[in-house]
Image (cartoon, coloured by chain):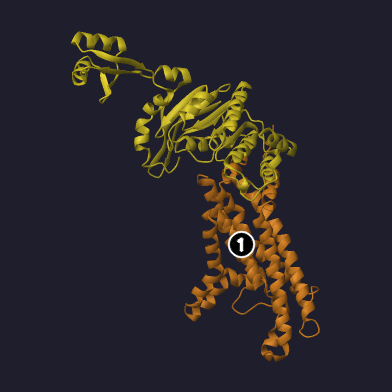
Amino acid sequence: MIKIDHLTKRYGKTLAVDDLDFEVRPGVVTGFLGPNGSGKSTTMRIILGLDHPTKGSATIEGKRYGELRDPLHEVGALLDAKAIHPGRSARNHLRALAASNRIPFSRVDEVLEFSGIGSVADKKVGDYSLGMSQRLGIAGALLGDPGVLLFDEPVNGLDPEGIRWIREFFRSLANEGRTVFVSSHLMSEMAVSADQIIVIGRGKFITQGSVDALTASAKGTVFVRGANHPQLLAVLRSHHGVVNEVNDEGLSVSDLTSEQIGQIAFDAGIALYELTPQRASLEEVYMDLTADAVEYGSTGSRHE
Amino acid sequence: MSSDVTLGSTIRSEWIKFRTVRSTIMGVVITFVLTIGLGALITTAVRAHWHSMDPVRRLTFDPVSASLSGILFAQFAVGVIGTLFITSEYSSGSIRTTLAAIPNRLELVWGKLVVLVASMFVVTEIACFITFMMGQAIFSGVVPTASLSSGAVLRTVILAGVYLTLLSVLGFSLGLILRQSAACISVFTSLLLILPIIVFLLPQSWQNDISKYEPSELGHAMTSVTAQSNDFGSWTALVILSIYVAVVLGVGTTMLIRRDA
């Protein structure tokens, strides 16, 4: 289990992480979702003891990363797939990593095969595609057979086959009772690969829940097309309906059900040509949740 | 249960990293070529012009430092090896993987230091002994030669390797502070080449007091058989240079521990 306890990180004037407080439990895949620059990578770096928190803490099974006796046996991480010396072969990279935690070299061969890069293990990493580098990063994370795994944007650069492979792989890790924490800026990806989702924006916690619960909480809208749009607009507003959008095609209304809208239009004597409830997609929920975060995100997103 | 991450495992890991990149191999080859190749060139030139040389210079001629003159060039190669050992981790971003595997940053510095010092000491001593013996062989019959049976000569050849090893640690220490290869190499070169020029522009009386503290002048003192005027003795020079390097290393290590990776 990973516990983030009132974590705050400031880089100069930029508040990258603002009082985050949540837990990542074992046995499920937890998605860590937020726009670029929202503090996901910073949070992951702090979990790994790479950056020092300004306030609060991040602990793994109750211990800060620096206190772990055998870090690679306890936590496996893939932060940036391209962050490997380009002149070294994948095998030598993994061997150096293995040696640091007294992991036998036979395990290096195992994770290379598992990740599907066994045949190119002696090639220089600099010649790898992003997808191959991601697989190497995953091999490195698995090296110590850890109970907690962190992946920062792991699907970037993977081909469709690789994405399918990685989803099933996350699922199987979670089924083995491990803690799997995966960041992404794509809701669509998290919707299919994660069980639980934690959403942040501008360093702040926004919401947390299962994929289903998040979708259910989404406000639906109703698309209305009728005889007299200006009149329809006025009458819907007088009934506390929120009209999000008006154009020649029709109106997009929220806070009223299609039944209510039909009745209101009938009472006002306006003929309706179309009345369509529209369920928000998870993507829209996410856009809605993080709208503020994106709006301000571009000013200080140097530390993603 | 005791930790799997110890100084021993850190050394083993860093040794794998050190020897599996081309820059190290190239650096070692260049160190050999510069030390031995330039040593051969210069000793051959001295032999050819020995009889036309100024008699005073012939009397004060030091066959040991002449045969070791290639280290003036090799010092930059070893500085680059030391620098890249840490800055390549920053330029590639692999420092994060390294620190995730070895969270104790002090231990990481010790591990890297042991690998760097041990390997550079072996490499530079071999290069210095080869160039010394080759130089004496080239001189023999024409120019007076030196022998390792003399304690002062043996000391000088050994200290030449020690000087180069210390400079590789200086490059490494600058790397810890600056993190960027280009910045480190600029500073390193400035310390060895530009500093003496600046001191040269100072009044003569100051020069005599200051110049002997320059890293390159300390190197000169360490690699001369007889003490030079205005220079420290070779052992004193070794101590002073070691203090410089230790201070820069200490600052670099503190910065590594305090800063975000």
**Dividing the picture into quarters, in which one does residue A299 lie?**
top left
Residue A122 in sight from this viewpoint: yes
How many numbered circles does the render carry?
1
Residue B17 position, x and y percent, is 67, 49
Horizontal side, residue B255 vs residue B18: left or right: left
Q: Which chain is orange?
A: B
- Give the residue at x 20% y 18%: A228
Q: Is residue A178 visible?
A: no
Q: Position of residue A296 (x, y in %)?
A: 35, 37
In front of the other: A70 or A76 = A76
Q: Residue B209 or A112: which is nearer the viewer?
A: A112
User: Residue A76 appears at what percent x and percent y?
Assistant: 61, 34
- B112, B97: nearer the viewer: B97
Q: Quadrant of the N terminus of chain B?
A: top right
Q: Residues within 10 Å of mark 1 (few under 14, many from 20)?
A: many
Q: Is residue B36 above or below residue B53?
A: above
**Which chain did the image draw in yellow?**
A
**Left of A268 or right of it: where is B80?**
right
User: Amino acid under label 1?
Assistant: Gly
Is residue B188 found left or right of A211 in the rendered image?
Answer: right
For residue B96, which quarter of the picture? top right
User: Residue A139, how many percent across, how many down?
Assistant: 65, 36
Give the structural element (helix, strand or loop) at label 1: helix
Residue at the image point whose x is 61% and y is 62% from the top: B79
Residue that numbered label 1 is attached to: B79
Q: Chain of mark 1?
A: B
**What residue is rendered at 59% in x and 30% in y?**
A166
The residue located at (69%, 84%) in the rendering is B60
